[in-house]
Image (spheres, rainbow, N blue to C red):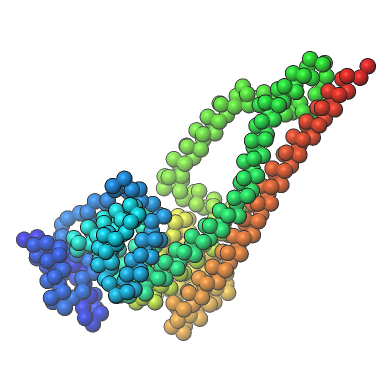
Amino acid sequence: MPAFAYIAREAGGQARQGTVEAASRREAQRLLSARGLRPLSVEEAGNRKAAAPTATTGGARWTRRQRLPFLQAVSRLVGGGLSASEAVRLLALRLKEPPLQSLAATIWEQLSQGRSLSQAFSDIPTVFDGQTVSLVAAGEATGSLREVLPRLIQHLTEERETRRRLFAALAYPVFVCGLSILVVLFFLFFLLPRLQALLDSLGGKLPAATQALVSLSGFLLHYGLFVAGAVALVAVSWWQWRNTPAGRQATDAWLLRAPLTGPYAVRLTILNFTHTVAILLENGITTAESLRMAERTVTNVAMRHRLHHAIDRVLEGETLSGALGRTQLLPLLVIDQLAVGEQTGSLASSLRAIAQEYQIEVSRWLEQLTKLISSSVLAVSFSFVAFLAYAIVTAILQVSSSFKF
C-alpha cells in the first residue's frame, strides 16, 4: 500500500506533518480527517510532482486573462458557503466560456486527486503567477480563503485598472506616431522620387532639406531590407540574451537606473511587496514565511536580489525596517513608519498603509509618465511632419522658379 506524506493542521491550529498509508490520496485525506486533522498537503511519498497541464485543453488557450474572472467566480461561491473544491466542481459544470470551463475542469481533476487549490494553481503558471499561488496557499493554511480571495481580487483589479489607464493614455500618441510614419513613408517612397524626376528634367536644383530627404529615400530603397534585417537580428539576439540569467540581471538593473522607468518600477514593486506581506500577516502567516512568499512575487531580478539579502538579515534577527533601509529603496519616512509598526506590534497595518500610499504614488507617477510620453511623441511626430512640409514647399518653389525666363 502506498505511503503519503502530509502536512496538516490540528484542531488547535498547530501544524503537523508525517506519513500515512492509504490506497489513494483521497483515502489518505479521509483518514487524516478521521484523526481530527485538516489536510493542507497530501503527496505520495517518493513520487515526483505531477506534470503540469498544458496551456491548451479542448482548443482553449489559457492566459492571464482567465485569472481574474475565474477567481471572481470562485470567490462568489466560496463566499456563499461552498468549499473551494465544491466551488471549482460546480464551475466546471456551469461555466459557458470554453477557456474558463476547461480551466475549471482541469483544476477540479487535480482537486479530486487530493491536491490543494494552491497546488493546482501552481501547475498552471500561464494563468496563476507566484503571488496568486502564495496568497491562496496562505488562505488555505489559515482557513481564511473566504477573506483572502476578495483581497486578491481587489489587488488584481487595481493592477488591471493601472494597465488600462496606461494603454488608454498611450493610444492617441501611438496612433499619431503611426500615422506620421505612414506619411513619411508615402513621401519618401512615392512623392519624393517623382518630385526629384521633375526637377531633374527641368534642370532645377533641390534645396538642402529636400536633398537630405532624397538621400534618405535612396538609402532606404537600396539598403532598407538589409537595415530591417540587421535590426531584427539585433532585437532577437538581445531578447535571447535577456532570457539568460546574466542578461536578465543586467537588463533589470538597467531598468532600475533608467530615469523614467526606474522610479515607476521601484514604486510598483514596493507596492506589490508590501501589499502581499500585509495580506499574509493578516491571515496568520509568520513574518519569515510572509517575506519569503512575497519575495517570490517580485519580477525584477535586481530588486529581488536586494530584497533577498534584506530578508536574510531579518531572519538573522535584524528588524525589517533596518534591513529594508539598507536596500535604499524606501524613503526614510517610510522606514520610520515601518519601525513604528514593529515597535507597536502593528506591522501588518503599517505595511497596508504603506501599500495604500504607494498606490497613490504609482497612480500619480503613471499619470505624469503618460503625459510626458504623449507630449514627447506628439512633439517629435509634428516636428518631423513640419520638416516634410517645409521640404515639399521649398521644392515646389524651386520648381516654380525654374519656369522663369
Residue 391, picture quadrant: top right
Q: Would residue 205 be found to the left or right of residue 61 on screen?
A: right
Which quadrant, please, contains the C terminus?
Answer: top right
Q: Nearer the viewer, residue 299 or 187?
A: 187
Q: Would residue 118 be found to the left or right of residue 319 on screen?
A: left
Q: Vertical placement of 218 versus 16: above or below? A: above
Residue at the extreme bottom of the image, as rendered: 344
Question: Residue shown at 32%/74% (left/top)?
Answer: 80
Q: Nearer the viewer, residue 66 or 22?
A: 66
Residue at the extreme left of the image, as rendered: 1
Question: Does the image show residue 216?
Answer: no
Image position, residue 372 (x, y; %)? 66, 54
Q: Vertical placement of 226 versus 356: above or below? A: above
Question: Does the image show residue 364?
Answer: yes
Question: Residue shown at 49%/69% (left/top)?
Answer: 324
Q: Vertical placement of 100 versus 155: above or below? A: above
Q: Vertical placement of 275 versus 182: above or below? A: below
Residue 281, picture quadrant: bottom left
Image position, residue 378 (x, y; %)? 69, 47
Residue at the extreme right of the image, as rendered: 405
Q: Would residue 44 be found to the left or right of residue 349 on screen?
A: left
Image position, residue 282 (x, y; %)? 39, 77
Q: Nearer the viewer, residue 229 or 81?
A: 81
Question: Residue shown at 16%/68% (left/top)?
Answer: 29
Image position, residue 86 (x, y; %)? 25, 67
Which quadrant, please, contains the N terminus?
Answer: bottom left
Question: Residue shown at 53%/77% (left/top)?
Answer: 337
- Counting every numbered tag in the picture gives 0
